[in-house]
Image (spheres, rainbow, N blue to C red):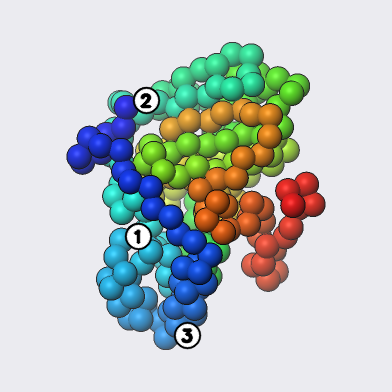
Amino acid sequence: MPVDTPSGEPPKRVAVGRRVFIGIAAIGALGVAFGADVQSFFGNAVGSGLGGLLPGGDRFRIYSITGAYPQISRRKYRLEVSGLVERPATFTMADLEAMPATSFVKTFQCVTGWKVPDVHWEGVKLSDILETVGVRPSAVAVTFESYDRADTESLTIDQAHLADVIVAYRMLGAPVTTEHGGPVRLYVAPMFGYKSLKWLSAIRVVDKVEPGYWEMNGYPVNGWLDGTTGATNPDPRLT
């Protein structure tokens, strides 16, 4: 599937390991303690990649694995759904917007500590898309791919059917911007932000859980949020 990038070449994959993550978390604590000035300094010093992980106060930190944002127009956008399904399909923006919409207001929580409260989200339930294509009995999980050709994610079939897991085309009262992962992104409300893959290009139904990009770089496969502490809530099915 073609990707509109500034150079026309696929972005290079960047590995962010556990040691780097621990270092970022430590710097993030400074951002929480001393405010946006510290965060801006480190964001500028580290760059558009790792700098985007630093926590701040009630605002999004824009982040890209590749250091760039794939540019996909609404007209050219396509979402491919395949794998263990009865009716593989490719959805356009018009197709998604014609499906029953769901909306809610939730806090977006990053695993490094920052969060943005009361974000309005709108899109199509992932479960509705899976119902449209017909999931086969042998299905165990769902994987997700990004137009950046670097990020990947996965959920179990049960997780994919949660009511607040959506394919989002609107947030903050407007269409999802390129910087926020638009025109279409995944939003997994009950999990940390790294599970909400940006620039969603493909959904594949598979027969096993496949760790995504961040899980392969040291993050938990399960990114559950705890309603009171913000800590992860381990799922024994994904040990």
53 is higher (above) or lower (below) than 34: above
Task: Find residue 13 and report its horizontal and vertical position in percent.
Answer: 38, 47
Q: Is residue 126 or residue 7 the one in the foreground?
A: 7
* The quarter of the displayed image where residue 148 is located: top left
Task: From the image, tell me which residue sits under label 2.
Answer: 1
Amino acid at the residue labelled 2: Met
Which numbered marker is on residue 49? 1
Q: Earlier in the sequence, mark 3 or mark 2?
A: 2
Q: Residue at x 55, y 22 (%)?
A: 82
Q: Is residue 64 or residue 208 the one in the foreground?
A: 208
Which numbered marker is on residue 63? none
147 is higher (above) or lower (below) than 138: below
Which numbered marker is on residue 33? 3
Q: Residue at x 56, y 39 (%)?
A: 166
> Mark 1 near mark 2, Cβ–Cβ under 8 Å?
no
Q: Element under label 3?
A: helix
- How far apart in space, not on screen, are marks 1 and 2 (Cα)? 25 Å
Task: Find residue 116 and report its horizontal and vertical position in percent.
Answer: 49, 63
Residue 100 visible within the image: no
Task: Find residue 219 and report its horizontal and vertical position in percent.
Answer: 58, 58
- How far apart in space, not on screen, are marks 3 and 2 (Cα)? 44 Å
Question: Residue furthest toward the left?
Answer: 7
Amino acid at the residue labelled 3: Ala
> Mark 1 near mark 3, Cβ–Cβ under 8 Å?
no
- How far apart in space, not on screen, are marks 1 and 3 (Cα)? 22 Å
Q: Earlier in the sequence, mark 1 or mark 2?
A: 2
74 is higher (above) or lower (below) than 193: above
Assign the N terminus to one quadrant of the image: top left
Residue 79 visible within the image: yes
Count of numbered marks:
3
Amino acid at the residue labelled 1: Gly
